[in-house]
Image: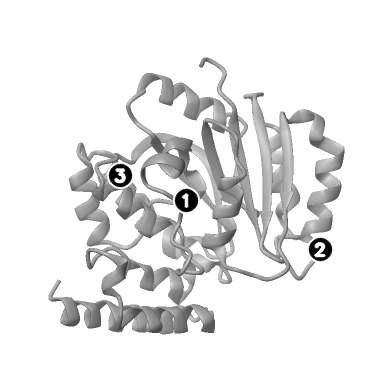
Amino acid sequence: MDNPLVSIVVITYNSSNYVLETLESAKAQTYQNIELIVSDDSSKDNTVDICMEWIEKNKERFVRTELITVKKNTGISSNANRGIKSAKGEWIKGFAGDDILMPNCIETYLSYAKKHSNEKLFFSYPVFFGDDVTRDKEFWERALIVFEKMKTSEQQFDYLKNQHNFVPAATSFIHRSIFFETIGFYEEFLLFIEDYPYWLKCTKQGFNLRILNEKLVKYRISTNSTSTSSIFQSSYLVFQYRDIKEYKLLKPLLLRINQRKKNDWYLNKILFFCIKHLGRILYGK
C-alpha cells in the first residue's frame, strides 16, 4: 500500500522526433516501482524501432515493460485504451510520446494521493513548450486557476460543459478503478479526442478532478498537434447533450471531421461554432 505499482502509459504515433525524450523522462523518475507501456498506433516512421531498442536497453529500470503495436491506425482513443487495458498498476499515468515528465512527477502525485485517499483523479499545471505556445497558454492557465478553486464535481461539470477543454490529459494521474470499475474507458468512436468527453463523464458521475498547484509535466504544443484540430474543438459536443445515443444526426458529422483531419485553426473554429449551435438547435440545450 505504501509502494503501489504505477503504470506509465506512453501513447505514440509518428513520434520519432521526440519519443526518446519522453522515454528518458519516465526512466528518470525518482519513484521506482513503475511499469512502462508504450502503445503505438501504426506509426509510419521509425517510432516502433526506436522504442523497441530503447526498451531493450533500459528494461531493467522498470518492473515490467510492454510495447503494443497494431497493423492499422485506429485513432488516439483506441490507442490510449489499449495501453490502459494492459496496465497492471494501481495508478495510471498516461501521456503522449512528445511530452516530458518532471523527475518528481510520480512521487509528487502519490504523495498527494495518500493525503487525499478518497480522490481518484489528479492533474497538475503543465509547463507549455513547443512552437505554438502563446495562443493556448494564457487560456489554459486562467481556466485552471478558476477550476482549482471549485469544491464540487457539479461545479466542475458545469464549468467544463460551458468552456472548452482546459484539463490537459498529459498531466493526468488516475486510479485504475476509474477505468476498470466505475467510469470505463475512452469513447472510441471519437477517433482523435479522448480526454474532454472523459472529464465530463467523470464529473457528471460525481468524481472530482483535483488540480495540484504543481508543475509536473512538460506539455508540447505545436501547429500540427491534435489539440489544435477540428476534432479537439468539436469535442465540446460529446456530453453536452446528455448521452452519446442522442447523436443520430451529429455523429456522422463528427466522424466526417475526424476523417478529414483538418489542422487549419480558423477553419476549425468555424466548424466548432457551427456544430455547437446545430446541437443546441436540435436538442434545445
Q: Which residue is mark 1?
A: 169
Q: Which residue is mark 2?
A: 46
Q: Which residue is mark 3?
A: 145
Q: CA distance from mark 3 to mark 2?
A: 39 Å
Mark in the foreground, 1 or 3: 1
- Describe residue 70's horizontal placement relative to residue 89 as left or right: right
Q: Is residue 18 above or below residue 218?
A: below
- Describe residue 132's horizontal placement relative to residue 122 as left or right: right
Residue 124 seen in render: no
Residue 18 in the image, given as x and y percentages of width and height: 71, 55
Mark in the foreground, 3 or 2: 2
Mark 3: amino acid:
Ile
Mark 1: amino acid:
Ala
Earlier residue among tags 1 and 3: 3
* Residue 17 image-quadrant placement: bottom right
Q: Residue at x 48, y 29 (%)?
A: 109
* Residue 76 image-quadrant placement: bottom right
Q: Secondary structure at mark 1?
A: helix
- Describe residue 206's horizontal placement relative to residue 127 as left or right: left
